[in-house]
Image: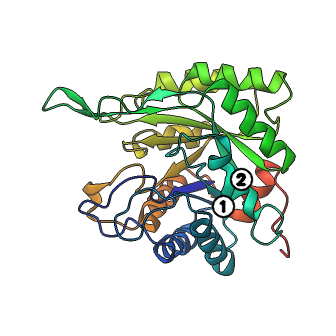
Amino acid sequence: MIEVRCNESTMRGANPHLPYTSEEIVREAVRSHDAGAAMIHWHGRDAETGAPDNAVELYREVQEGIRAATDLITKPTLGYISQSGVEDRVKHVRALADDPRLRFDAVPVDFGSMNIDTWLPAEKRFVPGDGVYVNTRQDIASVLGVFGDLSSFVTTVCWDVGQIRTALCYREMGLAPTTTLWEFVFTGDSRPSSAGTNVHALNAMIAEIPAGEPWQLMCYGGDVLQLAALAIVLGGHVAIGLGDHDYARFGTPHNGELVERVVQLADTLGCPVAGPAWARQLLGMPALPGA
């Protein structure tokens, strides 16, 4: 299974294909679906400036566009750009939850806080220097409570082994689901907020989750392809996209081109790639209404 992480909060820079507008996000979703992706993750963005925008209508527009054109598993952000409280993070999920056609298929929950500044090696400093991705344990409990009430499929996002252990504590509390996708977040050199893409770190994370549960590898601010082959061989899934890394060594690729590279890698390794319908079965998710 391949997830495309199409934009995050990343600015376009030299690649004009990183999507900001709802139409651009839908276009990249279709390209990625056609290339072999099963799931899409995206952030709402201001159409002109690219600034993060958590407006419900932006998520509705994207969801409508994706549903009209593909059967992708949809997984929006929880809007961590806002520190104003749990309700602001989940409002777009609530707003569409009662519509069987438009409700999101999955929602990601991060199980800890971390410093998330950018490291500038040439200048030997972090910028801005006070960037913190805040996920208090109280807020995690509140978010899980909301998604339990909405019967949302929760993916379990962990940036280190401690967050895996934390997630299992919430499972003991009856708040975190037992049917989930574990998402292991690695980071590149510019974002030293978790482990780099190395074999030992991946093995350590796999060892902490209950045996047989599905997991996925991503690399925020770095090249996930450096570890993707091992993840595939070990039975894991892969997330890739311009939101995580520019992949400038391939020129100015679309997200779909990055998905194609993972498909080619899986094919070389003799591993079939799950489309959306098969991925739903693998994850224990309900089928798309009308499918």
Q: Are marks 1 and 2 in contact (CB under 8 Å)?
A: yes
Q: Left or right of 33: which side holds 191?
A: left
Look at label 1 and name its amino acid. Answer: Thr
Residue 142 against residue 277 in the figure, above or below: above
Q: Is residue 84 visible?
A: yes
Q: Is residue 235 visible?
A: no
Q: Quadrant of residue 156?
A: top right
Q: Residue furthest left?
A: 122
Q: Residue furthest front?
A: 84
Look at label 2 and name its amino acid. Answer: Ala
The quarter of the image holding the C terminus is: bottom right
Task: Kindly identify the residue that appears in the image at 37 percent across and 42 percent down.
Answer: 221
Task: Kindly identify the residue that appears in the image at 86 percent across and 28 percent down.
Answer: 174
Residue 207 is situated, as x and y percent measured from the top left of the image, at 65, 21
Few, some or many residues within 10 Å of mark 2 (<14, 14–19, 20+): many
Residue 4 is situated, as x and y percent measured from the top left of the image, at 53, 58
Residue 191 against residue 50 in the figure, above or below: above
Q: In this orientation, which residue lies closer to the viewer: 112 or 69?
A: 112
Disc 1 from disc 2: Cα separation: 6 Å
Q: Quadrant of residue 135?
A: top right
Q: In this orientation, which residue lies closer to the viewer: 211 or 173?
A: 173
Residue assigned mark 1: 74
Residue assigned mark 2: 106
SS of the residue under disc 1: strand
SS of the residue under disc 2: strand
Q: Which mark is residue 193?
A: none
Q: Left or right of 248: which side holds 154?
A: right
Q: Give the mark, 1 or 2, whose residue is nearer the N terminus.
A: 1
Residue 247 against residue 18 in the figure, above or below: above
Q: Quadrant of residue 58?
A: bottom right
Residue 180 is situated, as x and y percent measured from the top left of the image, at 75, 41
